[in-house]
Image (spheres, helix red, strand yellow):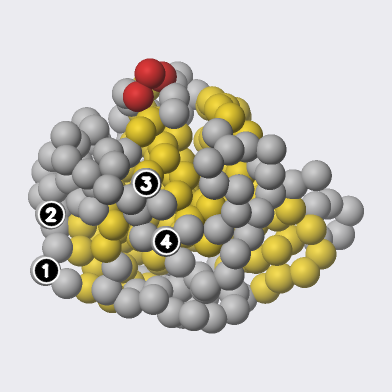
Amino acid sequence: MKPNARMLFAIAALAIAALACQGLSVGGPKVILGDDFSSEQWGTGSDADSSVEYAGDALNFFITRDLYFVWSTPNAETYQNVHIEVTANNNSTDSTGAFGIICNMQVTDVSYYFAITGAGQYAIGKSAVAQDDVFLTNNDTWETSSAITSGASSYRIGADCGSNGTLTLYVDGQQIDSVVDTTYTNGNVALFGWSGEQASGTNVSFDDFQMTELP
């Protein structure tokens, strides 16, 4: 469910660090950033409402407050025209809890985000300072896709953030939806967890992050 109030971005700590590997992939697109989460590079921390911590060579988001949005970044760099992929291992007990990728983040509350839920729903959203978030897909509401397996234990989430404004969501190698918006053309990247209606219902761990340069 999309909350009526503005989503709250929160993180207890931000680590400014290089990722575990970067460079060129042989015979493929340029790898800008990659991380298997075997060493601690991303922002971590905890408070009364949530925690972002390394656990089992993954980055775990656990949220104990309903309708709460928590994010973590790998560094303070600005990127543009990128494709991002990450594996999300979903241990949530609330099927309305969401998780995914953020790109073109300017400052807190200013970015695009690509969200899916364990119930097979998705949205490509845009946030802006002092404004309600807007879903750029499906007339500003959640949509269910048969290409997103309901109740799966893990999902490979992908996102294109093109310099021409093209924003495309992929799940498990299949394109789910695509929109065009040119409000933000570059920015930081992040991963997020977003709790649904049940407190302590969202528990997701991210692994095998990779960001490559789009053609």
Label 2 and label 1: CA atoms lie apart by 8 Å
Q: Which residue is mark 3?
A: 128
Label 3 and label 4: CA atoms lie apart by 9 Å
Mark 4 nearby-residue class (10 Å; few <14, some 14–19, many ≥20): few
Residue 171 located left or right of residue 98: right
Q: Amino acid at mark 4?
A: Val
Q: Amino acid at mark 1?
A: Ala
Q: Which residue is mark 2?
A: 65
Give whichever of discs 2 and 4 has the lower sequence position. 2
Q: Answer above or below: position of 170 versus 37.
A: above
Give whichever of discs 4 and 1 has the lower sequence position. 1
Q: Which residue is mark 4?
A: 107
Mark 1 nearby-residue class (10 Å; few <14, some 14–19, many ≥20): few
Q: Position of residue 16 (x, y in %)?
A: 49, 80
Check whether the beta carbons of the residues at disc 2 and disc 4 lie within 8 A of each other: no
Q: Position of residue 84 (x, y in %)?
A: 60, 50
Label 3 and label 2: CA atoms lie apart by 22 Å
In the image, what residue occupies the spot 62% across and 37% down? 165
In the image, what residue occupies the spot 14% across and 63% down? 49
Q: Nearer the viewer, mark 2 or mark 4?
A: 4
Q: Secondary structure at mark 1?
A: loop
Q: Secondary structure at mark 3?
A: loop
Q: Is residue 205 visible?
A: no
Give whichever of discs 3 and 2 has the lower sequence position. 2
Q: Which residue is mark 1?
A: 48
Q: Nearer the viewer, mark 3 or mark 1?
A: 3
Q: Secondary structure at mark 4?
A: loop
Check whether the beta carbons of the residues at disc 3 and disc 4 lie within 8 A of each other: no
Q: Amino acid at mark 3?
A: Ala
